[in-house]
Amino acid sequence: MNTLVNKLSELSEKIAENNQWRQKKCFNLIPSENTPSLFVKLCEISDPSGRYAEHKTALKKEVESLSGTGALKGDQVYYYQGADFIYEMERYLKSEFAAFIGGSNVETRPVSGQMANEIVFKGLVKFLSSGPDGYPALGSSGRLACVMNNDLNYGGHLSAQPYGALYNLAEKNIIHFPTDEKNPYKVDSETMANLVNEHRPTLVVFGKSMFLHPEPIKQLRDCIRSVPGYRPLVMYDAAHVLGILGPLFQDPLFEGADVVTGSTHKTFFGPQRGIIASNMNTDSPLSQLWKEITARTFPGMTSNHHLGTQLAMLAATIEMNAYKSEYQSQVLSNARAFATYCANRGIPVEGGEAEGYTHTHQVILRVAGFGDSKEIATRLEANNIITNYQALPGDATFYHPSGIRMGVQEMTRFGMKEKDFEQLARLIADVVLRKKDVSNEVCELRKNFSKMEYCLTHEETMRIVPGLFESLFPEKEFLLRLSEALKN
C-alpha cells in the first residue's frame, strides 16, 4: 500500500506542477486549445463519466415491439438501463447547441472533430450508394468521385485530406480551392467557380487549421445554382472557429452549408469532443443523409460516447449561449489588435495588412528570417509562451516550416483585452528577434490574468454546487477542506 501511495503521490505532485505552470505562469496561445470552466470540469468528472448509453433510432417495427418496455425513449432504442438521465441531458444539449448554431439537426455523440468528419464522409458514401436524384454518382471503386478541399500546405485541415478522415472514402481526384494571388489565406472565388463547373465535385469541404478569413460559402452556392442538375454536399469544418460562428464572423448554415462539423474545445470552450449539425429536416432532399449520419455515429463509429464529457459539453454550451456575443466580440478584437502589435514590433504577420491580418482568433507569424520556426517555438516555450510552429504557403516541406501559429481565445477568457496583447507582443518580439530571456517577466505579467471570464465565477460556482460537490466527494471533512481551498 505504501508503494501505491508513493507512486500516486509522485504522480499528483507532477500533475499539480504542470497545472500551476500552464494555468498560472504561461500564456497559452495555441489556437486549438482552451481551458474549460470549473463548472464544466465538475460535470466532466461526475458519475456519467463511467457509464454507457448506446442508442439508435428505432425502426417502426421496433417502436411497436418495444413500446412500454422502458428501452424506448422518444424515438431512440437504448441498450443499457439507467440511461434516463443521459437521455434527458442529450436532448437538452441538442436543444442548446441548435440554438447556438442555428440548425435543426444536431448529433452530439462524436468524441472528436476528426470523428465527426469521418462520420459525415461515411454517411455520404452510404447515401450516394442508393443513387439519389440530382447528386453525383460514386466513382467506379464505390468512393467519392471528386472532392474539393483546402490544400494542406495552405492551411487545409488534416481531417479533410485523403490521408486523414477521407482515407479509403475518396478517389484520388482531389481538387484544392484556388487561393487569392495577393493573399494565399483567402479563396479566389471566381476561379473556384470555374473549377467547380469543370470538375463537379461530389463533396466540397470548407474549413482550415490556419483559418484567418471567412470561407466563400455564398459564392459557392451561387455557382452551384448556375449549373443545371448538379448538387454536391457542401460541408463546413468549423473545428477551429466553432466558438466564433455567428454574425460577427460567419454563419455557415445560413450562408448555404449543408452540414457543419467541429471540435468543441478550441474557440468553443467545452471539453474535447466533436459535433455535427445541419438543417436536413424531413422535407429536405438530404433527410436520408441525416439518417445515415446518425447510423454511422452509432453503431458505425461509437460505442461509449464518453458521457462525462457530453454532460460537460452541455454546461459549456449553456455558458456559450449566455456569453456568445460578448466573448466573440472580444476574441475577434483581441486577435486583430495582437496581430497589429506584433507587426509594429517588427515581426512579419500573415493574412494581409489591408485585411487587418485576421478575421478569426488566429494570428500567424512568418519567422523564417529570424531562425528555424521549430527552434523559435521551443524558445518561446522556454519563456512560458506556448505556441506551435506551422508550415506556411510557399514552404517546401512541413519538416522546415517558417511560421508560428497563435490564437487569443484562451487568454481572452482569462481577461486579456486589446492593450494587454501589446505587452505580450513586446515580449514575443524580445524572444523572436533578440533571443532575450523574458521568462520571469512573462510569469509576472500572467499573474494579472488568473480569473476566467464568460462563465460563472468560482464564487458563483461554489454557491450553486454544494449538492454536486457532496455527490462527488461524500466525505464531509474532505468536502469542507475542498470548499475552503476553492474559496481561497
Image: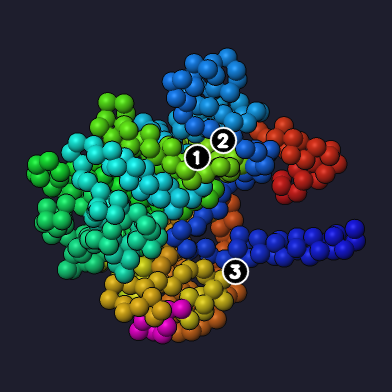
Asked if 416 appears above or below 399 in the picture, the reply is above
Please tell me which residue is depicted at 48% across the width and 63% down the height of the picture: 29
Note whether residue 218 is visible.
Answer: no
- 10 Å crowding of disc 2: few (<14), some (14-19), many (20+): some
Confirm or deny contact between disc 1 and disc 2 (CB under 8 A).
yes
Describe the element under mark 3 as helix, strand or loop: helix
Residue 432 in magenta?
no
Task: Decide which of 16, 120 is in the foreground and name it.
Answer: 120
Tell me the quarter of the image containing the N terminus: bottom right
Q: Is residue 61 left or right of residue 468?
A: left
- Identity, as a three-letter code, of the amino acid under mark 3: Cys
Please tell me which residue is depicted at 86% across the width and 41% down the height of the picture: 477
Q: Which residue is mark 1?
A: 299
Q: Is residue 255 left or right of residue 361?
A: left
Q: How is the image coloured?
A: rainbow
For the residues labelled 1 and 2, the Cα–Cα distance comes to 8 Å
Q: Which residue is mark 3?
A: 443
- 10 Å crowding of disc 3: few (<14), some (14-19), many (20+): some
- The percent position of residue 305, horizontal first and vertical second, equals 55, 42
Q: Is residue 188 left or right of residue 79?
A: left
For the residues labelled 1 and 3, the Cα–Cα distance comes to 48 Å
Describe the element under mark 2 as helix, strand or loop: loop
- Identity, as a three-letter code, of the amino acid under mark 2: Glu
Query: What label does residue 54 carry, if any?
Result: 2
Describe the element under mark 1 as helix, strand or loop: helix
